[in-house]
Image: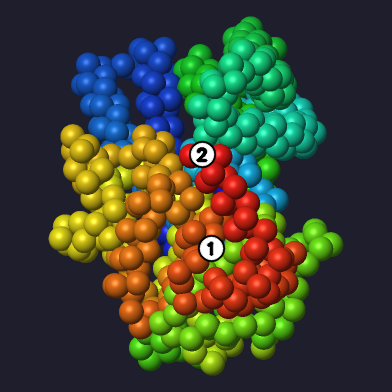
Amino acid sequence: MIFGKYINQFYKKYFFHYLFGILFLILVNVIQLYIPEITGSITREYDNGTLTQTYLYFSVLWIVLIAFGLFIGRFAWRKLLFNGAINIQGDLRKMMFNKTQQLDQKFYQDNKVGGIMSYYTNDLDVLNQCFGFGTVMLVDALVLSVLTLVKMFRLNVILTLICLIPMAVLAVSAYFIDNKIEAIFEKRQKSYEKMTDYVQEMFVGIRVIKAFARTKDESKFFKTVNKDTKDYDISLVKVNTFLNTAISILIELMIALGLLVGGLIIYNAFIGKIDSNFSRGDLYEFNGYFNTIIWPMMALGQIIALRSRAKTSLKRITKFLDENVDLIDNKTYQFKDKIEGDIEFKHLSYRYEKQNVLALDDVSFKINKGEIVGIVGRIGSGKTSLVSTLIRLDNYPKGTIFIDGIDIMDLSINQLRDNVAFVFQDNYLFSQTIKDNIAFSNPSLSQEEVEKAARFASIDDDIKDFIDGYRTLLGERGVTISGGQKQRLAIARAIIKDSPIMVLDDSLSAVDLKTEKTILKNIVEERKNKTTLIVASRVSTVMDLDKIIVLNEGKVEAIGNHKTLMKESKTYFHMVKLQTLEDEIKE
């Protein structure tokens, strides 16, 4: 068993699981020690010539009853202790999952998905073994060994002390072995994390690898990455093998010493050199106790290895759970109803961590409720950074961003995000059905509502062409459909949310102009009195909107309609001319 600030609470929560489990385990340890006593007494009765058939029958009956009791007791402690371990693992996993949802973008920029997943798999499995089988081995190593030694001392003190010499050697060595295993396992886990990162990234990018004929090269590189994990695993096996071999040698040594010294005692007592009542039956009983203590000795070796690994895994998980949650959620103000949709930026300047250049520089403008606003600019001008502020992915300076006149830093993050429908650039889709993806914000939405949203996004006809229609199961990240279909499904997922504010972050770039016009027409008709922001890479997407905001190097260069911006914004004018030239080339 191990202890730490995040797991101590579970021992209290599952106290009775462990209490009764340990009591049943101790009960099993106690009653199994009666078997050597019974077999020893049979031998003594036989040597004395007093063994009767009735005595033998009753002795065998007692052994059968003990065996039945062992069956019941072992079933009970396994159910209680192993269930407790699984419950602790489940609670800890839930705690970790909640933590992953609280952490902000900075954490995920510095930590890869594969590494995080190794906490949920490898490290939690090690802790599960420690909470379950580790507890069993610890109780057996302590209780069973003590009970057995008491009975051995009662039979013969000298013989027991001699047999304890190898155990003392093992106990002293345990400290050094424990540190050795812990150091190796810590390196092994880091190597495993690196390997998991690589494999996860390769699985996601497998199409790119195949397209560039890089399969052989990546296989070679994986062999290099995997070698470190393999080498550390081999090192652990070597240490464990050395430990188990040493324990086996000590056990055999104890058996030899026990038989030698016990035989000498009986022989010398027989020829009259010493005065001892130690009989052949006592030696037989002593040997039975010794066979019983073999398991606690083996368990001690396994405890050393398991506890070292568990301490390393607990350190890694504790470090993960100790990660600071930088995202501030003051919850000072709660809207009684939905947000109206007025948006205002006042001198907002924002810089990403580890970047010297401002992503947004003194941005100020206002969007009124119900306006459909386009946002354009060159690549890297801050368009995504600007609209992302509306769902609070980071902490922003107070007094710079307002929704309905309320500083978003005073709003509940959950309530804010619940009132903003956001279509991201990467159009992430889940490995679920098309219907489940569209109805992601509310799984209880009806089929009619889902189809209406699909028609809004001009994806309904495409879906009906699939054999399973809306029940079509998408591959990971929507890999089974085209880029344009992904974008339209993401738009359908956002529109069905019916939020007062909707943001489309360059979400029409993969659709043709006809489909784009249909979607924009639907936005104008069906999102009246609701605010919509459309980030676009094509000027044609935004030229007919209520208002267009032009960004240049994080600053607002100009705001106005198409005609105004053609005169006042060099960036906008250049984008229009460039797009016109591209259209002429295509023709």
Q: Is residue 475 visible?
A: no
Q: Picture coordinates of residue 19 (x, y %)?
A: 43, 56
Q: Nearer the viewer, residue 554 or 110?
A: 554
- Tell me the mark number nearer the camera, choosing from 1 and 2: 2
Q: On the rendered structure, is 351 left or right of 118?
A: right
Give percent across and percent down for residue 1: 58, 48
Q: Quadrant of residue 394?
A: bottom right
Compare residues 50 and 544 and report the one nearer the observer: 544
Does 584 appear above or below 346?
Answer: above
Please state if 70 lies on the left or on the right of 562 as rendered.
left
* Circle number at residue 586: 2
Between discs 1 and 2, the one toward the N terminus = 1
Residue at screen point 67% across, 86% down: 346
Which is more toward the observer, 125 or 166? 125
Q: Residue at x 29, y 72 (%)?
A: 526
User: In the rendered view, would you say 39 is above or below 357?
Assistant: above
Q: Which residue is mark 1?
A: 535
* Whether residue 460 can be seen here: yes
Residue 560, compared with residue 462, is above or below; it is below
Left or right relative to 339: residue 139: right
Q: CA distance from mark 1 to mark 2?
A: 24 Å
Q: Position of residue 454 (x, y in %)?
A: 26, 55
Say which element carries label 2.
helix
Name the kind of residue labelled 1 in the image.
Val
Residue 448, given in percent of the width and then of the height, sits at 15, 60
Give 167 or 57, whichever is nearer the viewer.
167
Q: Amino acid at mark 2?
A: Lys
